[in-house]
């Protein structure tokens, strides 16, 4: 799906030069057709190889204007390449603490006037118990300080679970936060070189989203027809506070389902974390369906012209995603789903194995007139025997 970023850039006259560790024959025909040249390295983890690849392409085509992976995993490598090749169109290594480390995000949220959950850098159980006393006890949420998505994250509800965590804690810095009840929403945007949004969207996620990777409930979420006004204001403040420029971003918020001292009233939004890349999976395509637009094209326009040329559409509606996991028994067959929702279906396909742990094995993505219709679609897909 991300080949479309390359495709739209090529359509705007950009020389798209690719570097990867997959063989050329493994690339899709669409991606091959969107690139001027592809340079294969043995490992993308080997910075020296990637550096040499960029140097070769710069020697052949001239100074590189833009480096981007649109993947949070490679943020540090992207930044180092920019520094080493004096590419000034993106973030540099010294600016990444606030972008990659969840603890480093807190001061920038504060700068933007956005409340966040109280947190504690995990050291040992004694310190954790002191933090628990400060926030009024269980539950708490633990997650890698430097990580992507909901992997290796847990809700801890009692001392036994706390002991299990410390007895099996991975060898990596972890963060412990007070647990906040509420749905998760995201503010998604493509912004220009001054941090002004050229495109804005919003997603709704269920409260159980963090349990899905670990074998919990089936995944569902939807792209909303419009960005809630409160979240739009906070999202734009966050763009400025974090110094985001010329990027496609995915900022996550809790929406409080009840008043919380120090955080806000029911219906208010609380900062969760920032992701300096597009939303994962097929979400960019869902944004296209929900807003009757082309986010890949808008991104390319930002790169080449630093503005949006694609006009706004008035045809906005909800685009909803619901997936199933292999080995589970569901009430409604695939045939029943298609009979009921076939005329509303935008996408229906098997997910790649690399994404199935989080995204499910079989996905259904459909148009919905409103949130009630979206929830009915989710319930029909997920109903279990």
Image (cartoon, grey):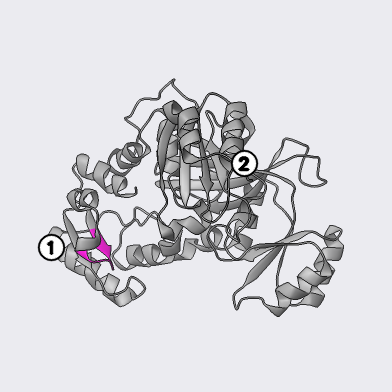
Name the side, left or right, on which 217 lies relative to 19: right
The residue that appears at 56% across and 43% down in the rendered structure is 220
Choose top left, top right, bottom left or bottom right for residue 186. top right
- Which of the numbered marks, if any, corresponds to residue 253? none
Which residue shows up at 29% across the image and 54% down it?
66
| Residue 250 placement, left or right of 230 | left
Q: Secondary structure beneath disc 2? A: loop
Q: Residue 58's spot in the image, x, y percent? A: 19, 63
Tell me if residue 225 comes above or below residue 45 in the rendering.
above
- Image x and y of residue 232, in percent: 57, 34
Residue 195 in view here: no
Query: At which x and y percent is residue 2?
Result: 34, 49
Q: Which of marks 1 and 2 is in front?
A: 2
Q: In which quarter of the image is residue 84?
A: bottom left
> Image point 56% across, 32% down: which residue?
227
Q: How far apart are marks 1 and 2 (CA)?
A: 56 Å
Which numbered tag is attached to residue 60?
Answer: 1
Q: Is residue 286 visible from the viewing direction of this image? A: yes
In this picture, which residue range is highlighted in magenta?
18-24
Give whichever of discs 1 and 2 has the lower sequence position. 1
Residue found at the very far left of the displayed protein: 60
Residue 360 higher or lower than 310, as above or below: below
Q: Nearer the viewer, residue 323 or 152?
A: 323
Which dot marks residue 383? 2
Neighbour class for label 2 at 10 Å: few (<14), some, many (≥20)? few
Of 86 and 372, nearer the camera is 372
Residue shown at the point (27%, 66%) measured from the top left: 22
Q: In this view, does 66 lie above or below 313?
A: below
- For this rendering, which residue is in front, 289 or 313? 289
Residue 97 left/right relative to 44: right
């Amino acid at each position: 799906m991300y080949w479309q970023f390359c495709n739209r850039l090529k359509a705007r006259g950009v020389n798209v030069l690719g570097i990867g560790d997959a063989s050329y024959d493994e690339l899709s025909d669409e991606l091959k057709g969107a690139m001027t040249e592809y340079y294969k390295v043995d490992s993308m983890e080997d910075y020296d190889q990637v550096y040499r690849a960029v140097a070769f392409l710069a020697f052949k085509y001239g100074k590189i204007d833009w480096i981007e992976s649109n993947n949070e995993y490679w943020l540090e490598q992207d930044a180092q390449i920019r520094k080493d090749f004096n590419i000034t169109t993106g973030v540099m290594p010294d600016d990444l603490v606030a972008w990659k480390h969840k603890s480093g995000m807190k001061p920038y949220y504060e700068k933007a006037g956005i409340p966040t959950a109280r947190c504690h850098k995990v050291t040992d159980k004694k310190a954790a118990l002191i933090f628990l006393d400060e926030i009024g006890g269980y539950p708490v949420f633990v997650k890698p300080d430097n990580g992507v998505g909901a992997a290796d994250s847990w809700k801890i509800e009692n001392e036994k679970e706390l002991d299990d965590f410390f007895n099996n804690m991975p060898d990596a810095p972890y963060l412990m936060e007070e647990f906040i009840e509420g749905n998760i929403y995201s503010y998604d945007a493509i912004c220009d070189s001054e941090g002004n949004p050229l495109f804005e969207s919003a997603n709704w996620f269920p409260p159980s989203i963090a349990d899905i990777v670990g074998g919990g409930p089936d995944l569902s979420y939807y792209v909303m027809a419009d960005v809630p006004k409160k979240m739009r204001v906070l999202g734009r403040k966050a763009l400025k506070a974090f110094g985001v420029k010329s990027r496609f971003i995915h900022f996550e918020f809790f929406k409080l389902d009840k008043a919380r001292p120090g955080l806000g009233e029911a219906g208010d939004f609380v900062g969760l974390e920032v992701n300096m890349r597009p939303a994962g999976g097929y979400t960019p395509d869902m944004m296209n369906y929900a807003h009757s637009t082309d986010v890949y094209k808008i991104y390319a326009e930002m790169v080449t012209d630093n503005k949006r040329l694609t006009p706004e559409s008035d045809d906005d509606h909800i685009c909803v995603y619901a997936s199933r996991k292999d080995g589970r028994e569901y009430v409604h067959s695939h045939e029943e789903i298609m009979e009921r929702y076939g005329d509303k279906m935008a996408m229906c396909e098997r997910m790649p194995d690399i994404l199935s742990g989080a995204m499910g094995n079989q996905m259904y993505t459909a148009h919905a007139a409103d949130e009630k219709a979206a929830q009915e679609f989710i319930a029909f897909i997920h109903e279990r025997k």
